[in-house]
Amino acid sequence: MSVVPDTYERIELASPETIRGFDLRRLPDAFYENPFPFYHRMRRDTPVRRMPDGSILLTRHADLDRIYRDTKTFSSDKKIEFKPKFGDSLLYEHHTTSLVFSDPPLHTRVRRAIVGALAPRALKPLEPQVERIVDSLIADIEPGSEFDAVEQFAIHLPIEIISDLLCVPRNEREPLRGWSLAILGALEPEIPKEKFEWGNRAVEEFLVYLKELVARRRAEMTPSDDDILSRLIRDVDAEDGLMHEELLHSCIFILNAGHETTTNLIASGVNMLCDMPETTAMLNDDPSLWPVAIEEILRLESPNQLGNRRAVEAFEIDGERFDAGTQITLCIGAANRDPAVFENPDSFRLDRGRFTHFAFAGGPHLCAGMTVARIEGRIALSKIFSAFPHLRRTRPAVRSRRARFRGFDHLPMRALA
């Protein structure tokens, strides 16, 4: 198979002047629209870049791969990093209890409790459910009409699926996205006071709701129930199991991680492929190519653009020594477009073969929910481009002003068959 003829986009290098003094806490407007010129310049000129706050930013694929694998030297625990940012707050309590921001033994306990329910074999029955939801969403889009691909399509499927997996009743799901945006928004490199307060309120309200949900599920569950919430509740009762508060915060994490990043994956796929008619025609002619397309979307527009680690031992990169305690930002968006690994890294290709991207992180923290995300992304995008193969934007998309999570607030489209 040849390279798909209509590539996604061509990225130019940002000028040296543009990235002089680059600071993740004070980003220019142009960065939110398109961070890749900044990433490309830094990866080429300063791949190990010191930030004004003393941390370092890494942009090469090889450096991220090393750090994801070396859990002895590099910790995911965020207690030290988050204390000055969040203080003694519910946001601090939540984010330092999260699966993604913890080390063993907490990480081991939480991952053990949920990984079986999210294994590919266990999720096979999920596909017909995803198909039914997507079919219903598409049926609500009138051919030829204008619709918002975020508000009317991308956000709904992930919320419904992860809520089903955690036994959240349908009539109780409305607050979930608002809580999620508030809690995840607090992870941006810099947050104003009002967003900090919004995030704390969201954690508080989420915990109140989950205490009631868990109590109801505990009273109703049977020994044969194998959903994620039942697994977590049983783990609380097991020797060396989760504490009750860890269970509640794990539910918040799963609900947030299970829908926000997948929403961004689906919206980014719509935005990307609507400009690639030859590619969408190829995918519609041969649906077996969709899994490859999903990996390219994940690589090119990783829903999660940044990760973090803290060095617990001194280490070296390129002969430069860094002390224990160094805070490290892993630039997933840059590593996934590293020309040392990916030929024509800014091009969308269906003939790349096997490759390793970091859209789902790596090492022991490889995303436990990646199979769910891939299933949802593949079914959602294949069905909407089958129904409306000539989808087109009616107005410019509105990007979310976030550095860590790359997605859209609005994506106005015309449903053209």
Image (tube, rainbow, N blue to C red):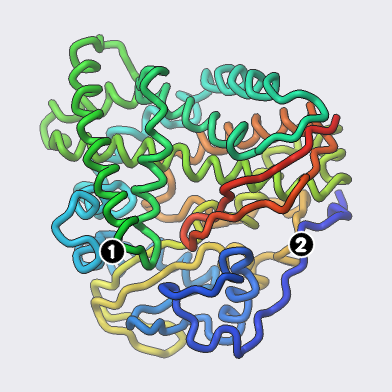
Picture layout, residue 11 above or below residue 187: below
- Mark 1: which secondary structure? strand
Amino acid type at image mark 1: Ser
Under mark 2, the amino acid is Glu
Question: Residue 124, how many percent across, how many down?
Answer: 53, 22
Q: Is residue 191 left or right of residue 17?
A: left
Residue at the image point whose x is 62% and y is 81% from the top: 41
Q: Counting other residues with Cα less than 10 Å from the Cα at mark 1, is it few (<14), some (14-19), or many (20 or more)?
A: many
Q: Residues within 10 Å of mark 2 (few under 14, many from 20)?
A: few
Residue drawn at point x = 23 percent, y = 10 percent: 220
The foreground one among 33 and 354 is: 33
Taking depth in this image into account, of 113 and 275 the one nearest to the observer is: 275
Q: Is residue 29 above or below residue 402?
A: below
Residue at 13%, 37% in the rendered image: 243
245, 342: nearer the viewer:
245
Where is residue 227 shown, x and y percent of the image?
35, 21
Q: Residue at x 59, y 21 (%)?
A: 133
Rendered location of residue 185, percent (x, y)? 39, 54
Judge from the rendering whether residue 289 lies leftward or rightward of residue 74; answer left or right: right
Task: Locate residue 314: give its quadrant.
Answer: bottom left
Query: Which one is earlier in the sequence, the residue at label 2 or at label 1?
Result: 2
Q: Quadrant of residue 248?
A: top left
What's the mark number on residue 251? none
Which one is in front in this view, the residue at disc 2 or the one at disc 1?
Answer: 2
Residue 2: % across, % down: 87, 53
Q: CA distance from mark 2 to mark 1?
A: 35 Å
Element class at badge 2? loop
Residue picked out by circle 2: 9
Name the mark on residue 75.
Answer: 1
